[in-house]
Image (cartoon, rainbow, N blue to C red):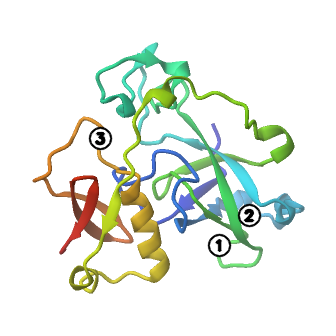
């Protein structure tokens, strides 16, 4: 596989990254091409599309072995499903697929052409293998069924940020919006429900701490 670009965003660790693309509004990132692919001609016509598909490398999940079944975290990590029925990174070819929204395209930067996007579910530095335009007339299927995922309870948490706590973090309004979206989706593994435990994730180079009680995510002081 050839890496054509890398994602640049605010997630240096896996925990906290949304489970799927497009779930968190305000989650900004940019695609920076490798030197040999910094050709503006390769982006000709892309400005007419609102969304793109990213094919990327699960670079943190490479393994020489594979299993026909995996344990999806959304099922508590106890029930097995066939690998082809999941989006688990642990598969023969560690390839991820994400649809993201284009927010801006810059053709002339010190890093060559750069694509700014919103809603990516990737860690900072993730290798991008390919980029394809999203075509709503063929890529969108409103009648599609969701298999076993429809049986999974999704925790929609209310996010509580005390003003005295928020002042101790240095985030912009848009970054706070992204943080609220991340916490609303409950980044914890589904088998964890300890109301006394303090969880944390890295975002924008800051360790954000929170706890969950009664379906409320409370951000605590750093």
**In screen coordinates, is 171 left or right of 216?**
right
Quarter holding the N terminus? top right
Query: Quick one: label 3, few (<14), some, or many (20+) residues within 10 Å?
Result: some
Marks 2 & 3, CB-CB < 8 Å contact:
no
**In screen coordinates, is 91 left or right of 41?**
left
Residue bearing mark 1: 111
Residue bearing mark 2: 38
**Which of labels 1 and 3 is toward the front?**
3
- Dot placed on the residue nearer the N-terminal end, 2 or 3: 2
Residue 119 vs 111, above or below: the answer is above
> Is any atom of residue 27 visible in this view?
yes
Residue 178 vs 72, above or below: the answer is below
Marks 1 & 3, CB-CB < 8 Å contact:
no
**In screen coordinates, is 192 left or right of 94?**
left
- Dot placed on the residue nearer the N-terminal end, 2 or 1: 2
Residue at mark 2 to residue at mark 1: CA–CA distance? 8 Å
| Residue at screen point 27% across, 84% down | 163
Marks 2 & 1, CB-CB < 8 Å contact:
yes
């Amino acid at each position: 596989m050839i890496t054509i670009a890398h994602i640049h965003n605010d997630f240096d660790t896996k925990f906290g990254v949304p489970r799927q693309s497009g779930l968190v509004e305000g989650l900004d990132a940019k695609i920076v091409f490798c030197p040999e692919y910094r050709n503006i001609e390769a982006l000709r016509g892309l400005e007419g599309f609102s969304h793109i598909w990213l094919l990327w490398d699960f670079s943190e999940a490479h393994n020489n072995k594979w299993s026909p079944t995996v344990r999806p975290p959304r099922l508590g990590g106890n029930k097995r499903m066939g690998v082809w029925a999941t989006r688990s990174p642990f598969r023969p070819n560690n390839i991820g697929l994400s649809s993201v929204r284009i927010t801006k395209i810059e053709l002339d930067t010190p890093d060559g052409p750069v694509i700014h996007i919103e809603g990516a579910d990737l860690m900072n530095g993730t290798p991008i293998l390919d980029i394809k335009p999203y075509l709503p007339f063929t890529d969108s299927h409103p009648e599609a069924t969701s298999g076993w995922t429809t049986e999974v309870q999704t925790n929609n948490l209310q996010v509580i940020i005390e003003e005295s706590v928020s002042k101790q973090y240095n985030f912009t309004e848009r970054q706070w919006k992204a943080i609220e979206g991340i916490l609303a989706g409950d980044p914890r593994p589904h088998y964890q429900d300890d109301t006394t435990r303090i969880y944390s994730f890295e975002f924008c180079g800051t360790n954000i701490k929170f706890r969950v009680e009664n379906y409320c995510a409370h951000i605590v002081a750093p």
